[in-house]
Image: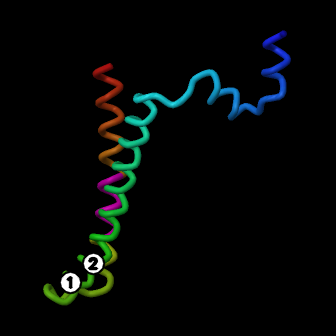
Amino acid sequence: MNPYKENAKLSLDQLIEKRCGTGIYQVLALSILVFIDLNDGCELILMSFLMPILKSEWQLTSLQIQVLTSIFYLGRVFYFKIDKEWYQVQY
């Protein structure tokens, strides 16, 4: 019996699952990615609740709320750029 003929009928997904399988590393990596995505979603939901409260408590205009929201997203972009440059210098 030729093992290559058996593998010729498998799709790529089936072949990877048959050869590699799913181990503890894959489960751990997926769990970390799920928690990162969950954290990102929670930040966005928190911002959507926080901005109307800030607008009413501090009597902010719509323009000021837009600036605060933009600062939040720009901070995330610049943090990623700074963190990426630091990582390249360190490693």
Could you say where residue 77 lies in the image, as x and y percent from the top left? 37, 51
Overall secondary structure of the magenta stretch? helix
Q: Quadrant of residue 86?
A: top left
Q: Amino acid at mark 2?
A: Phe
Scheme of colours in the image? rainbow
Q: Is residue 57 left or right of residue 62?
A: left
Labelled disc at residue 49: 2
Q: Position of residue 35 (x, y in %)?
A: 34, 49
As rendered, which of 28 and 37 lies closer to the eye?
A: 28
Q: Which residue is mark 1?
A: 53
Q: Are marks 1 and 2 in contact (CB under 8 Å)?
A: yes
Q: What is the number of callouts on the image?
A: 2
Q: Give the answer, above or below, for where 60 lies relative to 18.
A: below
Label number found at residue 5: none
Look at the picture and state if 39 lies above or below 8: below
Q: Quadrant of the C terminus?
A: top left
Amino acid type, label 1 = Ile
- Is the residue 81 above or below the residue 91 in the image? below
Q: Nearer the viewer, residue 89 or 34?
A: 34
Residue found farthest to the top: 1
Q: Is residue 28 magenta?
A: no
Q: Residue at x 84, y 10 (%)?
A: 1
Crowding near the residue tagged with mark 2, few <14, some 14–19, many ≥20 C-alpha atoms within 10 Å: few
Please state which of residues 39 and 69 is positioned toward the viewer in this rendering: 39
Q: Residue furthest left?
A: 57
Q: Secondary structure at mark 2?
A: helix
Q: CA distance from mark 1 to mark 2?
A: 7 Å
Q: Quadrant of residue 54?
A: bottom left
- Could you tell me which secondary element the residue under label 1 belongs to? helix
Instruction: Find the magenta span and give its range.
Output: 69-76
In the image, residue 65 above or below residue 23 = below
